[in-house]
Image (spheres, rainbow, N blue to C red):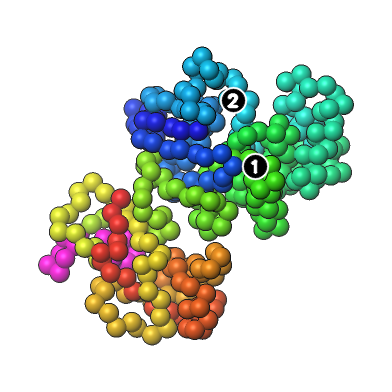
């Protein structure tokens, strides 16, 4: 799938503006960004649920709606699972079978495919359970089974683990990885959980104010710029961040810092870098070779280090550390 010059205007405001975005078959993509960045809107456009104000969507190299490829054919090759999925007031089996019934699939085939889909999500034996009897995590699993039973080429997931307990988060993440590896299903995940995005996806892209941005969104801060005698700083309301820019950016209210550009030390680090903060490590996430640290200071920071550095410095949950980064490492959005 490829999106070209896609825009969407809502209440006279441009909420999505994508020049070009391509998705390759059989990969997992994560779309990250803060609330209100346009993730759900863009996901709905990808799923052909929402028609963009302008632009074209291509599938297998052909514009959707052209003679060679119909809108309905593409819609039937994909499915979207909403953040708060709606289940009909009927049994789990009937909820999962709903899409098959609307497509006229015979009853015996439906029953077999429903059973297989429930096995995929670990809900064998839930066939007769009522939708209202399910927990939040179980509801998400049933919604995912309802998507998988259609054997789609593309699955679009909007915040798949939001408001779900840890046990179901691990199960959902495992299912996402498995359907990609074993079925070759292309998966697109919209999430604000950055560690999850980088852990699951082959490709991660960041969305801000409806547009793709190159900078990492791990350390995203909102605030106001101030020009001082000592230079330009960014005031978040809790901390001041020095920025390496001569001209005051009048319209921007957000900055980011790449986690790889933050130096972590147990003692104050001797450097010409202007930004220094003290904090406590609250989370350590292994990302396969690199370690993402969550550090609570007056603001919460994310920093990326190697596993060797983690062991050499002797860091753990609760360790008090110093963060250091240059003014030139601050990206203005």
Give the image quarter of residue 139.
Answer: top right
Question: Along the line of sight, which residue is nearer the eye, 104 or 134?
Answer: 104
Q: Percent from the top left, x then y, of residue 100?
A: 75, 26
Q: Earlier in the sequence, mark 2 or mark 1?
A: 2
Residue at horizontal 30 percent and vertical 64 percent from the top: 329
Image coords of residue 217 (percent x, y): 41, 55
Q: Give above or below for 128 relative to 101.
A: below
Question: How many numbered marks, from 0 up?
Answer: 2
Left or right: 224 as drawn, with respect to 142: left
Tell me the tag on residue 102: none
Dominant secondary structure of the magenta stretch?
strand
Q: Which residues are magenta?
A: 226-241
Residue at 35% across, 35% down: 19
Instruction: Assess whether mark 1 and mark 2 are in contact (beta carbons under 8 angstroms).
Output: no
Q: Is residue 105 left or right of residue 153?
A: right
Would residue 117 be counted in the magenta stretch? no
User: Label 2, on which residue?
Assistant: 75
Q: Which residue is mark 1?
A: 184
What residue appears at the point 36 percent right and 54 percent down from the top-left corner?
A: 215
Between 66 and 32, which is closer to the camera in this rendering?
A: 66
User: Camera-side residue: 249 or 60?
Assistant: 60
Q: Secondary structure at mark 2?
A: helix
Residue 296, picture quadrant: bottom left
Q: Residue at x 36, y 50 (%)?
A: 214
User: Does dot 1 land on a helix, a strand or a loop?
Assistant: loop
Between the C-alphas of marks 2 and 1, the distance is: 18 Å
């Amino acid at each position: 799938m490829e999106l070209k010059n896609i825009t969407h205007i809502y209440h006279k405001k441009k909420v999505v503006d994508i020049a070009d975005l391509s998705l390759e078959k059989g990969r997992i993509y994560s779309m990250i960004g803060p609330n209100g960045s346009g993730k759900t809107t863009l996901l709905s456009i990808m799923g052909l649920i929402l028609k963009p104000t302008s632009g074209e969507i291509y599938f297998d190299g052909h514009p959707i709606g052209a003679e060679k490829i119909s809108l309905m054919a593409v819609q039937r090759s994909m499915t979207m699972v909403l953040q708060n999925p709606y289940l009909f007031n009927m049994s789990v089996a009937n909820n999962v079978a709903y899409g098959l019934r609307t497509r006229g699939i015979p009853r015996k085939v439906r029953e077999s495919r429903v059973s297989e889909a429930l096995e995929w999500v670990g809900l064998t034996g839930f066939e007769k359970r009522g939708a209202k009897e399910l927990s939040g995590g179980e509801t998400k699993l049933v919604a995912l089974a309802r998507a998988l039973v259609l054997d789609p080429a593309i699955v679009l997931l909007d915040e798949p683990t939001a408001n779900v307990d840890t046990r179901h988060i691990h199960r959902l993440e495992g299912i996402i990885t498995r359907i990609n590896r074993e079925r070759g299903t292309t998966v697109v995940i919209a999430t604000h959980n950055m560690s999850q995005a980088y852990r699951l996806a082959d490709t991660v892209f960041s969305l801000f104010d409806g547009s793709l941005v190159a900078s990492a969104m791990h350390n995203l801060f909102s605030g106001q710029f101030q020009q001082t005698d000592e230079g330009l700083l960014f005031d978040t309301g809790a901390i001041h961040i020095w920025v390496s820019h001569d001209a005051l950016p009048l319209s921007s209210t957000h900055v980011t810092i790449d986690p790889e550009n933050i130096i972590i030390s147990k003692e104050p680090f001797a450097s010409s870098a202007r930004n220094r903060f003290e904090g406590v490590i609250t989370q350590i996430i292994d990302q396969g070779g690199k370690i993402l640290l969550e550090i609570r200071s007056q603001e919460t920071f994310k920093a990326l280090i190697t596993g060797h550095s983690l062991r050499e410095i002797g860091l753990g949950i609760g360790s008090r550390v110093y963060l250091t980064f240059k003014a030139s490492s601050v990206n203005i959005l």
